[in-house]
Amino acid sequence: MKKMRLFAIGLLALASAAAAAAAPPTPSHCVADEEVLFTCRIGDKVLSFCAPKTNDDRLAPAWIQYRFGRIGATELVFPPAKTSPVRHFRYTTDKGGRWVVALVQFSIDDFSYVLSAYGNSNIPESEASLLVVRPDGTRRVLQCADPGLYAAAGLWRFEQLHLPAVQKEFTR
């Protein structure tokens, strides 16, 4: 009986691992010749940061775009043209011994957006959210459902751009 229970537990563990391995990756708005810097689901929509693919990761991306909406029906692209990200984004990281928080800030028509991604080297799962600050100052936090493994690490390409820091009012 004990052997049977251990066998059943082993099968469940194997099935769980197979299901996790077979789980589809989080969809993104990035296309085949683009690098996915970050992507996650927010409700039935997807938030993605895309950049051109390169064979040399030492080079800063020539452009970065934020894209949001349903897959195949993007509602928002920022900046609209694939231009230098330097004028459009701010970036800050806060690091500890085994954790990192990456923040990306940008503004569109008096709305401010701050993506916050948290990762811990002890735990591969990540947490991420998008803070939206309306022109009247009201704030809304949209939680990412599946930011993927090590989501904050995917934003490291912003670091290569030496962007201005995220404004203090958004780092609290």
Image: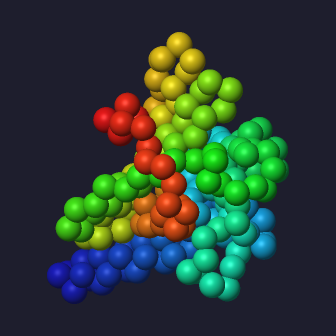
Which quadrant of the rendered structure holds the C terminus? top left
* Figure quadrant of residue 7: bottom left
Residue at 56 percent across and 80 percent down: it is 58
Camera sees residue 147: yes
Residue situated furthest left in the rendering: 2
Camera sees residue 70: no
In the visual, does 15 lie left or right of 32? left
Q: Nearer the viewer, residue 99 or 87?
A: 87
Residue at 58 percent across and 80 percent down: it is 57
Residue at 43 percent across and 60 percent down: it is 152
Which quadrant of the rendered structure holds the N terminus? bottom left
In the visual, does 5 lie left or right of 162? left
Give the image location of residue 31, x and y in percent: 78, 65
Give the image location of residue 97, x and y in percent: 20, 67
Residue at 44 percent across and 67 percent down: it is 153
Q: Nearer the viewer, residue 170 or 38?
A: 170
Colour option used = rainbow
Residue situated furthest top in the rendering: 136
Q: Nearer the viewer, residue 126 or 35?
A: 35
* Figure quadrant of residue 27: bottom right
Give the image location of residue 66, x and y in percent: 66, 49
Decide: is 111 above or below 13.
above
Q: How many marks?
A: 0
Decide: is 17 above or below 138.
below
